[in-house]
Amino acid sequence: MKLKVAGIWFSYNSVPVLSNVGFSIEQGEIMCVLGVNGAGKSTLLKCLNRILKPHRGSVFVDGEDLSSMDQGRVARMMGYVPQRHPDTGLTVFESVLMGRKPHIRWSMGMQDHALAEEIIRGIGLEKLAMRSLNTLSGGELQKVVIARALAQSPQVLLLDEPTSNLDLKNQLEVMELIQSIVRARSLSAVVAIHDLNMALRFADSFLFLKDGRIYAVSGKEELTAETICQVYGVEVKLIRIGDRTLVVPI
Amino acid sequence: MQVEAGAITRDFIRGLHQKILLLVGLVIMVFVVGVYAIVQGSYDIALRDIISVIFGGAQGTSRVVITSIRLPRVVAAVVCGAGLAISGLSIQSLLKNPLGSPSTLGISQGAAFGAASAIVVFGSKAISVTAFAFLGAMTATLVILALASFRRLSPEAIILAGVALSSLFASATILIQYLATETELAMVVFWTFGDVARSNWREIALTTGLVFVATLYLIALRWDLNVLSLGEETAKGLGVKVERIRFSGMVAAALVSALTTAFHGVIAFVGLIAPHMARQLVGDDHRLLIPFSAVLGALLLLTADTFGRILIGSGALPVGVITSFLGAPMFLYLLVRGYR
């Protein structure tokens, strides 16, 4: 069991956002977190790597409890990709190198540079290496941010809506990239996502949040139109085309 | 473990080395302008006089003019320029606000009010003027910090808050002047103009020490600041204690602006312009931004003061007037261009 989350509770100004959320993910698996806007998806991700401190509950990576660790050590175990990225003049290489921050004491060494370069080449970003982030397209930027999270050498990846604002081709490319990384490096990934069809295509399991509580946790096979209908309040049908299942609102 | 550098890494490190050369070039420019500033003026000084003063020779008028008038002015301009630039940079990076600087957020004006009150209440003793300047600067800083972190105001709203604070402190300073005796009034008014010509060696040494320590502190934070420019959430995800460094960095910035303001009055906009010039030259890597901002701030203020003194003649024009003439258009330009 790579990532185990037990009974997370969190509230903003005494308004409960998450109540008793718990689940676990194996190595090499992607779990998609689904739910309407405001269901608590982003909050859940932030509670996992302790950007927000959950009021109750624990997160374990490889059996180690994160609540007893300092933030730097958490950052060496979990790579986090937030939903929004500010404008910055940092170059692609510089920003990927930043992923080494939790591993350094005073300055970046040759190993850190070499690792950043290896990741940039692995993702195929070498032509962009010296470009600044504010000149990149949305898809390129998303890949750079994922590369930065990888430079943390994490065991767990947390991604908050990695495909929002991307065109169809880039959505597929980014999700394929995430899937291949998770498989190749035996990571566990938690992905908050709105696009149900992307989730169906790439996830190994689903976590449905409704009003900050778990409505359902299911594998690919157990997913039903009923669950989606209850969570989103929209009538849908699951349709099989070839070996793919699609969600279609009716 | 020995690791071979790849092509991208080599390019990157070559780029760093080129920028360090550029930095050395800028430092040399500061020296050249500094020497020019010592030589030029209503009393002629030869280059060899400077050299002999350094080695303990050259008695008489040349020595007095160099050691008591021109050299302190040059050093004060360099140190204040660097200090204001460093505080401007840390404010801009910590608040993620490109329009931030000691003067646009009311921190300098807070310091000025504190210093003016100290002059009227306690006389112009360095210790009370400095302490009160720091109190004033800290008040403004805490208000700005509270608005930025608790209310999560946008960068523009923070600047508006800075405008409000500035005018509040300006009115309070006028009130102090209204209550002051004629001698005190003259002192306060003279003092409010930003001017690098008035400090003595002791004050300059104090400012230099503080600017030096603040710069070292900022250098220690360079990776945190780099990570912060990727966004607050990313920074936290990378283990940076954002609230803690934001507070300590802002206190450092307030201290530096308070001390430069206490001894030299309000010198506006240097803290805004210099970091932006540095960003144009070296991008957003704080390893380079910190030294470049400091050196460009020094160069900017020294050049402004020297040319103001020589071109306008009398030698009495406060440099704060010149930096405002340079800075206000720059501020407007940043607004219009849609700053980043």
Image: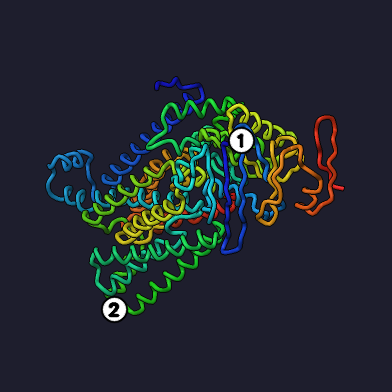
- Mark 2 lies on residue: B181
Residue at the spot x=56%, y=36% of the render? A2
Residue at the spot x=34%, y=68% of the render? B114
User: In this orientation, does residue B309 appear?
Assistant: yes
Examine the rendered structure and indicate whether residue B289 appears above or below residue B181.
Answer: above
- Which sits in the foreground, B324 or B88? B88
- Which sits in the foreground, B187 or B115? B115
Which mark is drawn over residue A26? 1
Residue at the spot x=42%, y=53% of the render? B244
Rendered image coloring scheme: rainbow
Which chain hosts label 2? Answer: B
User: In this orientation, does residue A34 appear?
Assistant: no
Going by the image, does A49 lie left or right of B73? right
* Amino acid type indicated by mark 1: Glu
Which mark is drawn over residue B38? none
* Amino acid type indicated by mark 2: Thr
- Which sits in the foreground, B221 or A7? A7
Residue B119, image x and y in percent?
28, 70
- Which sits in the foreground, B257 or A27? A27
Residue A86, image x and y in percent?
58, 46
Among the 4 quarters of the image, the one containing residue A85: top right
- Label 1 Cα neighbours within 10 Å, binned few <14 / some 14-19 / many ≥20: some
Going by the image, does A169 lie left or right of B323? right
- Label 2 Cα neighbours within 10 Å, binned few <14 / some 14-19 / many ≥20: few
